[in-house]
Image (cartoon, grey):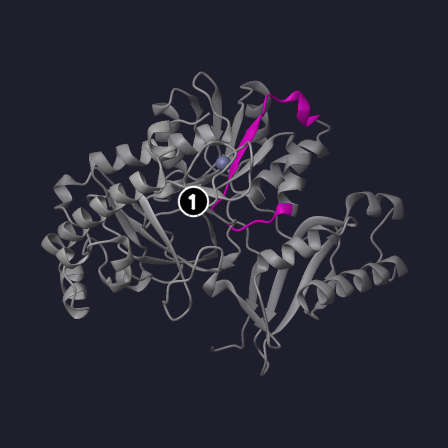
Amino acid sequence: MIWNPGAETLRRSELESLQLERLRATLRRAAERVPFYRDAFAGARMTPESIRSLADLERIPFTLKAHFRESYPFGLFAVPVTQVSRIHASSGTRGKPTVVGYTKNDLQVWREVMARSLAAAGAEPGQVIQIAYGYGLFTGGLGFHDAAEYMGLTVVPVSSGNTLLQIMLLQDFRPQGLACTPSFALHIGETLREQGVEPSKLGLRYGLFGAEPWSEELRREIEAVLALTAVDFYGLSEIIGPGVSVECAEVRDGLHINEDHFLPEIVDSAGNRLPSGTEGELVLTALTKEALLAIRYRTGDVTSLNPEPCKCGRTTVRMARIKGRTDDMLVIKGVNVYPSQVEAALLAIEDLAPHYQLVVDRTRGFPSLEVHVEPAERLVQRWGRFEPSNPELAALRQRISDRLRAMLTLNPEIVVDPPKTIPRSVGKAVRVVEKKSVGV
Ligand SMILES: [Zn+2]
């Protein structure tokens, strides 16, 4: 279902003139109200009036994550805090969190773009949705919650974690939709299987999974254990939260960006714009925000854009599934690789459980990589027990090694761990563990 055909099926020329008009209004607002942007525009020798077409976008300076941190907590806000209806913040693994604010109108825009996402995944008014994203400062839980209520769904706000409670509610409340991280979805599905619950007996039809990069292979695993259509979505708190883009359930080949609210570009590491179809870093400009303006924000997420019309009827540009973050890229012995690429290679091996962890050892001169995997459950059942000296394990290690070398030219140490020893995710999965020398 297309939630807002008027916005989602606009002709390109109409869309672009709307984008330009909104961009210029946002630039004026930024220059008038936010000292950071006023200074940045002056430094780049541009004014809002000098931006006459979308091609002029390149003259506008970038906004970086560091700028958010430097202006903690409210320095980037374009309205007094008294006009901010809600504040969210990122986890802030390194020091202070990134703080974002929403006016009443911003919250309404968020509901609208999230309702479009829910509808694209298959949600219809009258259905039930179980929201297993964390509630709180993180935008996942409340972002879904508000929009689901707004579009007429019945919300089960269970939040993240507590796998057994999740399963009980899936069985008893019979939601058609589930929203959580892909790694948690897999964990719920595998736990169901261990309990002997047939997933097709649940009422699930679709799942909205995102907030961490995942692969096509993981999608197939999740669909097998939960018996639903797994849909990828994308968003980030600096821009709005979830709701920036979503796959359509019909095609699932790229995520439709809500371009009337978010203007996308792809740039290389030096910040030069790249043509459609080329892979690079996603840069987004929020076109309709009031409280927190994000102008040419460098997301750090690696993707490409596809402007081809989609069979679902939406005319909005599609971004490829996120490959990883520019700062997640591992450089191992001269090979650049994203964890999601290793995931895709590993999950294509049938004799492995869909769990893995990458350990990057930086204690020596050059970083080296250990890939930790687990054997598939049925293998262990056949063996009777997990025995490190089992010759089949050595053969399995060799196959993994051959595959990683062939697909990614990687030659890591392969460690096949005993079953169920790699940590399972009840929120965001920890895929990469860094080993560093003491004192670094
Ligand atoms: Zn589509």
* Spot occupied by residue 300 in the image (x, y as percentages of width and height): 41, 60
Q: Secondary structure at mark 1?
A: loop
CA neighbours of label 1 inside 10 A, class few (<14), some (14 to 19), many (20+): many
Is residue 204 located in the magenta-colored stretch of the structure? yes
Residue 4 image-quadrant placement = top left
Q: Is residue 357 left or right of residue 34?
A: right
Please state the total of marks drawn on the protein image.
1
Name the residue furthest top.
126
Name the residue furthest front.
13
Name the residue furthest left.
32
**Is the residue marked 1 within 8 Å of ligand 1, measured from its CB?**
no
In this picture, is 42 found above or below 232?
below
Q: Nearer the viewer, residue 77 or 229?
A: 229
Amino acid on which disc 1 is placed: Val
Is residue 121 located in the magenta-colored stretch of the structure? no
* Spot occupied by residue 250 in the image (x, y as percentages of width and height): 55, 31
Can you see residue 387? yes
Q: Is residue 290 left or right of residue 390?
A: left
Q: Residue at x 56, y 41 (%)?
A: 184
Q: Residue at x 15, y 59 (%)?
A: 50
**Residue assigned mark 1:** 317
Q: Nearer the viewer, residue 412 or 160?
A: 412
Can you see residue 420? no
Range of residues picked out in magenta = 198-216
In this picture, is 118 found above or below 274?
above
In this picture, is 157 found above or below 291?
above
* Spot occupied by residue 247 in the image (x, y as percentages of width and height): 50, 38
* Spot occupied by residue 65 in the image (x, y as percentages of width and height): 32, 60
Q: Nearer the viewer, residue 293 or 189?
A: 293
Residue 407 image-quadrant placement = bottom right
